[in-house]
Structure formats: C-alpha cells, structure tokens
Amino acid sequence: MLDVRNLRKIYTGRNRNVEALRNLTFHIGAGELVCLVGPSGCGKTTLLKCMAGLLVPTDGEVLLDGRPVDGPPPGMAVVFQEYGRSLFAWMNVRDNVALPLRRKKLGKARTRELVDHALDVVGLADAHQAYPWQLSGGMQQRVAIARAVAFEPKVLLMDEPFAAVDAQTRAELEDLIRQLWRELGVTVLFVTHDIDEAVYLGQRTVILSKSPTVVREDLAIDLPDERDQLHTRSSPRFAELRAHVYEQIQLAKHHSGDTDTEPVDRTPGSAPAPALQKTQP
Amino acid sequence: MSVRTVLRRALLLLGLPAALLAVWWYATAGSTDFYVPPLSAILEAFGKVWTADRLLSDVVPSLLRLAAGYLLAVAAGVGLGLVIGTRRVVREFLEPVLELFRAIPPPVLVPVIMLFAGIGDTMKVLVIVSGCVWPILLNTVEGVRAVDEVLDDTCRSYGITGTARLRHLVLRAASPQIVTGMRQALSIGIILMVISEMFAASNGLGFTIVQFQRSFAIPEMWSGVLLLGTLGFLLSLLFRFAENRVLAWYHGLRRDRRTP
C-alpha cells in the first residue's frame, strides 16, 4: 500500500546542510494502523511531508500502491498538528469540511451526505454553522478530522494531531481515531512523540532514531483489537510494550544514523561509532 | 440593546462633533471678519448652494470619477499584488521601482498626467488611480506573503490549487491587509478627487469650491468644505459597513484571541 524506500532528506542551507533523514525504509499494508514514534526533533514531520508529497526527498522514494509519490496524491488526506492553522478561519465548519470535495465533483446531494456524515461521526453534528475559532482546540481538531473523513482517502496521515490538546480530550480523540479506522477501513499512519499514544493506538509502532534518522525498530503491538482507555492502559502487556518503547526512545536519543552500528548506514571513512554512553550532566 | 446603551453610544459617537460645531457657532456668532463668516451664514449659504441641481451637476460627477479611479486602483493593486506577492523573483525585481513610484506625491503627477491624458475625466481618474494604487498594492503584497504555511500545505494536500487556491486561500487570507490598504486609499482618493478638479475642470466639487474662493463668495466656499467633510464621513461609514460584513470572521477571531 504505502512503501517508503531508502528515504533521505537533506536540507540545504546557506552555510550548512542538515541531514534530517538518513535512510528510512518501511512498509504499511492496506488497512493497517501504524504509529511512528521517535525522540523530539527526529524529523517525523519531514518524513510525513515527504510521504504526503509536500516535500521532495533528496534520495529514495515513497510508493503509494506501487506508484511513486511526486506530489500530493489524490487518495491521501493529512491532518496536521496545528489545527488552528490548518482550518480556514473565514469559513464555517461545514464549508471547511466541504471545500476539498468540490474538486471531486460528486454532486450536491452526495457532498451534503458526506459532510453531514463526517461531522456526525466526529461528534460535531450541531456545529455546522460555527466558525473554527469559536470552538475549543479539541473540537477544531475534530473539524480537521471530519474534513479528512469526508474526503474518503485511502491513506490518512496524521502529524502529531493531539499534541496541542489537553489530556482528556486527547484520550477521546484517540478512541475516535480507532473507531474511524475500523469503520472506514482506511490505512492510517499516525506520527506522535507520545509513547503511550504510540502503543495504545496502533497495530505496529515504528521507532525512529534521532536525526539523521533511521528506523530503529518495527514493533508489532500484540494488544487485543478491542481497546479502551481504562483496561488496555492498565494491562500488563501494555506496560511491557510501553517500557520497551520508552527504553528504545531513550536509546534513540543517543543513536542516530551516524552512530548506528549497521554497516549499511555507515559512511565510509567516518570516525568509528562511539560506544553507547550516557551523557554526563 | 437597551435604551441606555443606545443613548450611551449615540453620545459617544456624536458628542465631540456636536461640541465642535457649538464652539464654531459661538466663536463666529458675531464675526465681522470677511473671511471667517458666522456659522449661521455658512449654513444658510449651504441650503442655497447645494440644491438638487448642483448636487447632480457637481457632486455626482466628482463621485463618479472617484468611484472609477478607486475601483480601477483596487483591481490593479490587488491583481498586481497577487502576482508580486506570490513570486519572489518578481518581487525582488520590482521592489526598488515600486518604492520609488510610491515616494512620488501624486499631486505632482497632475501636470504630468495632463500632458498625455488631457484635462478631461481620464486625467482625473488617472490621478486618483496613481495615488490610490500604492497602499492597496503594498498591503496586498504583504498579505499574500503572510499566507500561513500550514494552511497552504493543507490546500496542496487536498488538491486545492490554481484559481480555487487563489479564491479560497490567498485572497481570503490576505483580505484583512487588502482592506487596510483600501481604507488608506479611500482617504487618498478623496483628496485627489478634489485636487484633480482644482487644476483644470468645468465641474466637480473641487472646481466649485475654487470658483467660490476666486469670486470671494466666502460663506459658499465654506459650505463646500463642509459638504466635502460630510461626504468623506459618509464614505468612511459605508466602508466600515462593508468591512464589517467582509471581515466579520477576522474581527471575531481577534476578539476571541484577546479573551481566551
């Protein structure tokens, strides 16, 4: 479904080049819900933008259904972290959700049906006429999610969508995502820096190193499919997985593509990788 | 709104103008100075001078020229502003020239424009355009440049490109700044409307006021100034009314940010 192959991104600045992504390869099958987690500043957003066709990678490629992504593909929707900046402040909720559908030329009745349904499933059935800035942060992000749902994408990319909402709202929205994923059969890639979220939400968690980024581990989350905030989070298996991911992230903070021991990623002639050290305070 | 708040607002709105008129009235009440006639005489002249005929023959042509010049300036300013704002190369290329043109006071251009546009309506409209276009153009450029990156990415990922992007994203996002430019341009436009008519004209508000001055019809001249002020005030009211409709979302957003 979605293939990332040897993806590399170097930002060329005036005086120096920053290698954000070193070499990323992973695969997401159709209908999967995969979480992507990594230490802060590990190039998660860069990766997501490359996958969404919003950024051209320096090397490597992203394939959607076997076809290389060289611009935003039609079957993909993105939900950004900054909900306040991704909604049109000059349109009410309904128009915000309906705007991307115009290009699809589905006819009035079908568009209305999609918009009504999308706003209904995210719990905003009575907020059609409100403007985004009249809503709370969590509700604004629900609008952005409704917009993605109405678009009927095959792939939904989410870039730390709940990083800026409070903990209770976050829990609600996490369950909403799982519910939508199951009901719509959509493929979801969920980028987060929150370890609990990465374990709770997905079927798999891809753990990234710090920048320049490589994949550290591709971890299967073998929790039961029926999940709820209370029981899943207090189960022993959840605690084990959480501890494992936590440990990996801690290690990842000191490991990047530069320090990785995999010979493929080593640049020839560079200094030998230092042994894993704890930073001295 | 209760009766009290209505009264309060009326007092706030009309208090100062009423007080100023009262001061004017009493300060000039027994004036024998030829150049500073009593306000009562000016108001009397006002009634006599600004008849329906006069309004039709002098005020309407002025307003039509203002409207034509202003709308052309809006079209040119917003159109060019969109092109310059979205393309960095164009912006860097044009910026020095734009700054130079902007620095020229438009009244200076009147004789120049007269040379090739004659002394007819075209000249007057061009003078108004030459002054009004700059604030609109420069504000549009700034507004277009400030379009939010995340919103732009959102549009791209949903395939909202080309004219749809221009209409739903760029123009709307830049609209607060465009309106700011248009507001500045409106007052410049009124000034230039009068000035262009003072140079060479056979009708118009500016022309009439200068005629009165040259024929020493002082109360009549003052009444023209009063009418001009009133017109400016009404136009800005009209502008604010339109602005409140177009930018309702923006004012709401800002109110909302101030009181979280």
Image (cartoon, rainbow, N blue to C red):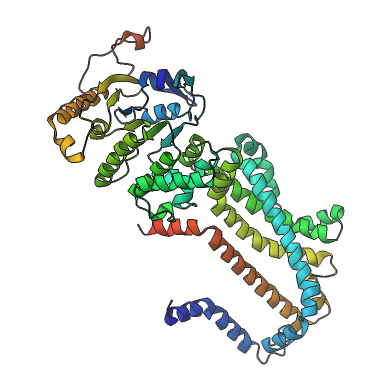
Q: Nearer the viewer, residue B109 or A154?
A: A154
Residue at (45% x, 29% y) in the render: A52
Measuring from the top left, give residue B213's x and y in whole percent.
Answer: 79, 77
Q: Residue furthest left?
A: A236
Q: Is residue A233 above or below residue A270?
A: below
Q: Give B43 or A168, whichever is nearer the viewer.
A: A168
In which quadrant is the N terminus of chain B drawn?
bottom left
Relative to A107, is B116 on the left or the right? right
The correct choice, above or below, for B136 with respect to A153 in the image is below
Q: Quadrant of residue A17?
A: top left
View extreme (front): residue: A109
Above or below residue B233? Residue B21 is below
Horizontal placement of A191 versus B169: left or right? left
Residue A47 percent across, percent down from the top left: 40, 26
Total labels: the figure holds 0
Say which of B25 and B59 sits in front: B59
- Residue A190 is left or right of residue B236, and the answer is left
Q: Position of residue B228 (x, y in %)?
A: 70, 73
Q: In this rendered view, identify the residue nearer to me: B222 or A215.
A: A215
Residue in the image at 22% along x and 35% along y: A227
Q: Quadrant of the C terminus of chain B?
A: bottom left
Q: Is residue B14 visible?
A: yes
Say which residue appears at 54% left-offset and 61% top-offset. B245
Please state the horizontal and vertical placement of residue B184, each as a whole percent of the image: 62, 59
Q: Is residue A58 visible?
A: no
- Residue A192: image quadrant is top left
Q: Residue at x 24, y 46 (%)?
A: A168
